[in-house]
Amino acid sequence: MTGGNNDGFTEAYSDQYVQDGRYVLLDTFGPVCVQLFRSARYDPFTNKMLFSRNVTIETKRDGRIHEEILPFDDLYSDKRAPFLVPLVRNEKQGHGSAWNFVPICSEGHIKISTDKAGSFLFYDLFHDTYAPEIAVKAFSPRMDVSRAIKRWKAVGQPFDRRAAVPVARAVNLPADTTLTVWSFSQAGSVRAIYTKLRKMTDRARRHVRVKAYWDGETRPSVDSPLGPFFGTDYWPVPKPSVAKPRYEFTPTKM
């Protein structure tokens, strides 16, 4: 590595390639959905927002290419629908990191570019690609995000409001062992998982793994260390408020 930690400070590497004077941040075939557009343009040493150019979003909708051009700031400012709070936050509101969770989907390829100039452009674009026969609802400036906003404001509330069957179990997990905590043979959905360790350590968050199988799988669909599974990574977390491990399951009538 010879970049000298210059991945965004001078924008030397802040693109995939340059085309017709524009700096392409993402160019991929579809169907595709950008799930998160994150950037960092705020210089904490000077207390200034350094990068403030435009961004062009090219998507395919109803078989035609559509182009949306807007100021980079509008991705996060709550000034332009559908990029609205709380689905977006700018760098100052997000403590140095701006984020946009409004899905930007395309029936075909998607290209996002900017007229890059100046300095300080760190960015991440998280996207999912799908098989050609998968239909996606393409991005439109008039798309309705009210349901997403409503759901975002209900953080902590379960997606499934039907009555659930709680299951609690205390287990001992010796080193280098695999233990089945819970299984069920009927159709349904796991609504929530709560876990409390006798001693919450960085080692446990890193080395205790959560695995989940369904529909007769031999390889797990979920296989994650405990920390990342619960969104805490490997760092200390607040003391859990739930006294016992608990697993909630909602049966589904066939």
Image (spheres, rainbow, N blue to C red):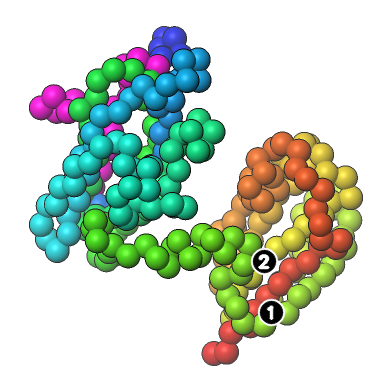
For the question of whether residue 185 can be seen, the reply is: no
One can see residue 116 in this view = yes
To which quarter of the image does residue 82 belong?
Answer: bottom left
Verify CB contact (< 8 Å) between mark 2 and mark 1.
Answer: yes
Above or below 201: residue 18: above
* Marker disc for residue 27: none
State the image quarter where residue 190 is shown. bottom right
Q: Is 228 positioned to the left or the right of 131 in the image?
A: right
The residue sitting at 29% across, 17% down in the picture is: 118
Q: CA distance from mark 2 to mark 1?
A: 10 Å
- Residue range corresponding to the magenta coloring: 9-29
Q: Can you identify the residue that label 2 sits on?
A: 192
At a point 35% along the width and 54% down the height, the residue shown is 103
Which of 177 and 110 lies nearest the eye of the viewer? 110
For the point 35% across and 15% down, the residue is 10
In percent of width and height, residue 106 lies at 24, 55
Where's residue 201, x and y in %?
Answer: 82, 39
Figure quadrant of residue 120: top left
Which class describes the residues within 10 Å of circle 2: few (<14), some (14-19), or many (20+)? some
Q: Which residue bears the numbered disc 1?
A: 164
Name the spot of residue 186 as percent of width and height, x first. Answer: 63, 82
Q: What type is the residue that disc 1 sits on? A: Ala
